[in-house]
Image: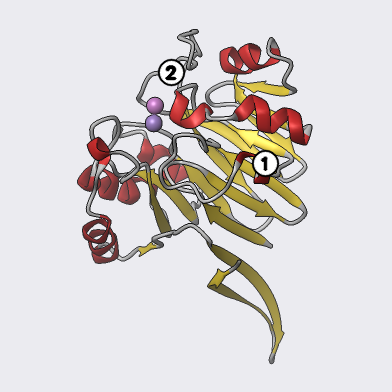
Amino acid sequence: MLKIIYHGHSFAELHINEHIILIDPFIIGNTLCDIKLADAKCNYIILTHGHADHFGSTPEIAKSNNATVIATAELANYLESKGVKTHAMNLGGAYQFPFGKVKLTIAHHSSSTPDGTYAGDPAGILIHTPEKTIFHAGDTALFYDMKLIGETNKIDYAFLPIGDNFTMGVDDAVKAAEFLNADSVIPIHYNTFEVIKADVHDFKRKIESIGRKCYLMKARRSLVCRLFIEFIEFIEFIEFVEFVEFL
Ligand code: NI
Ligand code: MN
């Protein structure tokens, strides 16, 4: 089973069978975040880059959960020096973790830790779970190699920044969805701050006009994908995607 929960900004929580993975756990200062630091539970954290609105409370959450942080080598080394358990990777490399295969892709952006330490290159994240392929673009400009990522991976869910100013805006993110050939898109990195306000309904309309699905995720609402096997005349896989409200 795959469950996707969104906590505002670029902070996504994935439940992949028994594993919980947090991507860019930005809690303190995240005006859209619905959870407290003590509520963050996980086995793994994956970081796209070192900026404060992505790095967030990574050291605290990783230590209290005894979780492993997956990040580019420089960022992983920095966290390791703070006593955090890490798994260093770099762009273009993939590794099989217990929850799925993770590959870091390029992202056109910059990266340093909140204290100004060089944090290597920023990254996008591809996660191949047993059922689905998820892409989290991190912070990035639109780039043509997204086409290559889309050609070599069948992306089911793409998290794309739409807030403009620091990353792609609405129209570039629509083009990105097209390049990535993503089945469904989840907009991120918008409305957290004044400078990244975006018209998410305009984005949804434009994504749907190119024949793709757009899920506007909200706090306290998760996206659950279940695969059921139905026995009719032959074995058929039927997919149910549903929003589930939870307390
Ligand atoms: Ni950034
Ligand atoms: Mn950012």
The residue at label 2 has a CB less than 8 Å from ligand 1: yes
Nearer the N terminus, badge 1 or badge 2? 1
Q: Nearer the viewer, residue 38 or 139?
A: 38
On residue 233, the disc is none
The relative height of residue 131 versus residue 232 in the rendered view (above or below) is above
Which residue is found at the position 50% from the left and 56% from the top?
156
Does dot 2 land on a helix, a strand or a loop? loop
Which residue is found at the position 28% from the left and 41% from the top?
163
Q: Give the quadrant of the C terminus.
A: bottom right
Please name the amino acid that badge 1 sits on: Ala
> Looking at the image, is mark 1 or mark 2 nearer the viewer?
1
- Local packing at callout 2 (Cα closer than 10 Å; few below 14, some 14-19, many 20+) is many
Q: Position of residue 47 (x, y in %)?
A: 55, 30
The residue at label 1 has a CB less than 8 Å from ligand 2: no
Query: Which quarter of the figure has residue 127?
Result: top right
Query: Which quarter of the figure has residue 226?
Result: bottom right
* Quadrant location, ligand no. 1: top left
Q: Position of residue 3 (x, y in %)?
A: 62, 59
Which residue is found at the position 30% from the left and 44% from the top?
162
Give the residue pinned by disc 1.
38
Q: Position of residue 179 (x, y in %)?
A: 33, 46
- Local packing at callout 1 (Cα closer than 10 Å; few below 14, some 14-19, many 20+) is few
The relative height of residue 229 versus residue 155 in the rendered view (above or below) is below
Which residue is found at the position 30% from the left and 38% from the top?
193
Q: Quick check: 61 left or right of 47?
A: right
Q: Residue furthest bottom?
A: 233
On residue 111, the disc is 2
Q: Nearer the viewer, residue 104 or 67?
A: 67
Q: Give the quadrant of the N terminus.
A: bottom right
Does dot 1 land on a helix, a strand or a loop? helix
